[in-house]
Image (cartoon, rainbow, N blue to C red):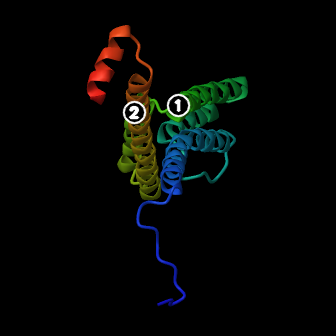
Amino acid sequence: MDNGLQNPPAGPSPNTGAQALAILTRRHMVGANWFFWIAGLSLVNSVIILFDGQWHFFAGLGITQIVDSIAREVAMEAGGSSEVFLKLGALVVDVVIAGILVVFGVFARKRQSWAFITGMILFAADGLLFLLVQGWLSLAFHGFVLYCLYGGLKAARMLDGIDLAVEAAEALSGAAVTPSHPTDDLHSDALEQ
């Protein structure tokens, strides 16, 4: 009886594996890319704070905001040319911190678990600064980013596991087809009988 609906295939569709890989790869890259976003937004916040802006993104790092606020206050008291050098010094510190995040991002994109884990630990510690000053929105944002970073780490580890399984399958199938030693012919003949 034809009811106009097609029956779904009995097994997984051929695209299921490719789709799963695409989803995992996307999750991994989205997680890793958060390091670049944090670095960029922190630098924008630094420029705003150092040049006496009255607002900033809640998405930046707490440590750079502390460095910038201290530098701005000391620079205002010092005045003159010292003000410029103090603010530039703070900006250099901010660029170094952002550079460290970029390095984490580069290695996280290469599926290096240490980059995700170290970056997450440092970012969680940075989030504690907002807990101390009761910056709830920034603290919530840190929690969200940590969740995204963890998703990237988890996806990267799953992709690594898939790569290992594929390599093992290729090694096994290659060993059965192309013996690497003359005595392997004897073993494979014995297995066939």
Tell me the crowding category of disc 2: few under 14, some 14 to 19, or many 20 or more residues within 10 angstroms, Cα based: few
**160 lies above or below 58:** above
Please name the amino acid that badge 1 sits on.
Lys
Please name the amino acid that badge 2 sits on.
Ala
In terms of depth relative to the viewer, which is nearer, 121 or 139? 121
In terms of depth relative to the viewer, which is nearer, 21 or 170? 170
**140 lies above or below 183:** below
Residue shown at 55%/27% (left/top)?
Answer: 103
Residue shown at 38%/26% (left/top)?
Answer: 176
Looking at the rendered structure, the secondary structure element under dot 1 is loop
In terms of depth relative to the viewer, which is nearer, 57 or 187? 187
Q: Which residue is mark 1?
A: 110
Q: Mark 1 near mark 2, Cβ–Cβ under 8 Å? A: no
**40 lies above or below 27:** above
Dot placed on the residue nearer the N-terminal end, 1 or 2: 1
In terms of depth relative to the viewer, which is nearer, 125 or 146? 146
Looking at the rendered structure, the secondary structure element under dot 2 is helix
Tell me the crowding category of disc 1: few under 14, some 14 to 19, or many 20 or more residues within 10 angstroms, Cα based: some
Residue 42 found in image quarter:
top right
**193 lies above or below 53:** above
Q: Position of residue 7 (x, y in %)?
A: 47, 77
Separation (CA) of disc 1 from disc 2 = 23 Å
Quadrant in which the C terminus is drawn: top left
* In this picture, residue 189 sits left or right of residue 32: left
Q: Which residue is mark 2?
A: 169
Q: Position of residue 19 (x, y in %)?
A: 52, 54
Q: Position of residue 115 (x, y in %)?
A: 45, 30
Residue at the farthest front position: 193
